[in-house]
Image (cartoon, rainbow, N blue to C red):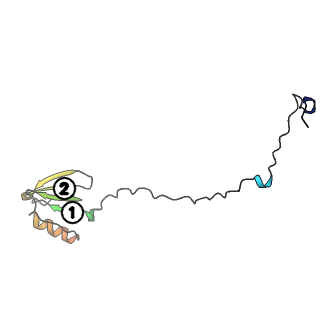
Amino acid sequence: MPLLPEDVEEAAAGEPQQVDTEEAPAARAPRREQVVEPPQSYAAAPQPVPQQESDQYVFVRRDGTLFFAVAYAWENGTLRYITGEGIRSTVTADKLDLDATQQFNEQRGLNFRLPA
């Protein structure tokens, strides 16, 4: 039977229309379970640890004064070294008491290399 305009009931302009919000049981989407990951703890970046004096090499000048270095290298009879504060410096081997320098470092358990 065809519908005629008189057969259709329209809601008045001021009346709210009802909307069917109930879904049929078969039409419902399957529920997904949300997996919650435990928060990961990230380790902070390691901070540079200042070298302790016992980890530093000891150098003895011929006049008896001492100075310390965290790293060193010999280059053409010249000692190039870096202090615990990061200062780079040089001194010629003839200004050092190499025997005393070696003894001090051996007592501290450090492997000291003499210039070649």
Q: Tell me whether the residue at label 2 lies in contact with that at label 1, contact meaning CB atoms closer than 8 angstroms.
A: yes
Residue 57 in percent (x, y) is at 21, 63
Q: Which residue is mark 1?
A: 57
**Residue at the image point whose x is 79% and y is 55% from the top:** 25
In the displayed structure image, the side of residue 83 where residue 31 appears, left or right: right
Disc 1 residue type? Answer: Tyr
Is there any visible trace of residue 53 in the rendered image? yes
Disc 2 residue type? Answer: Tyr
Q: Residue furthest top?
A: 13
State the CA–CA distance, disc 2 to disc 1: 10 Å
Q: Quadrant of the C terminus?
A: bottom left
Q: Residue furthest left?
A: 94
Q: Nearer the viewer, mark 2 or mark 1?
A: 2
**Residue at the image point whose x is 35% and y is 56% from the top:** 48
Q: Of helix, strand and loop, which one carries label 1?
A: strand
Q: Which residue is mark 2?
A: 81
Residue 31 in percent (x, y) is at 70, 56
Residue 16: which quarter of the image?
Answer: top right
In the displayed structure image, the side of residue 100 where residue 12 appears, left or right: right
In the displayed structure image, the side of residue 32 where residue 17 appears, left or right: right
Q: Of helix, strand and loop, which one carries label 2?
A: strand
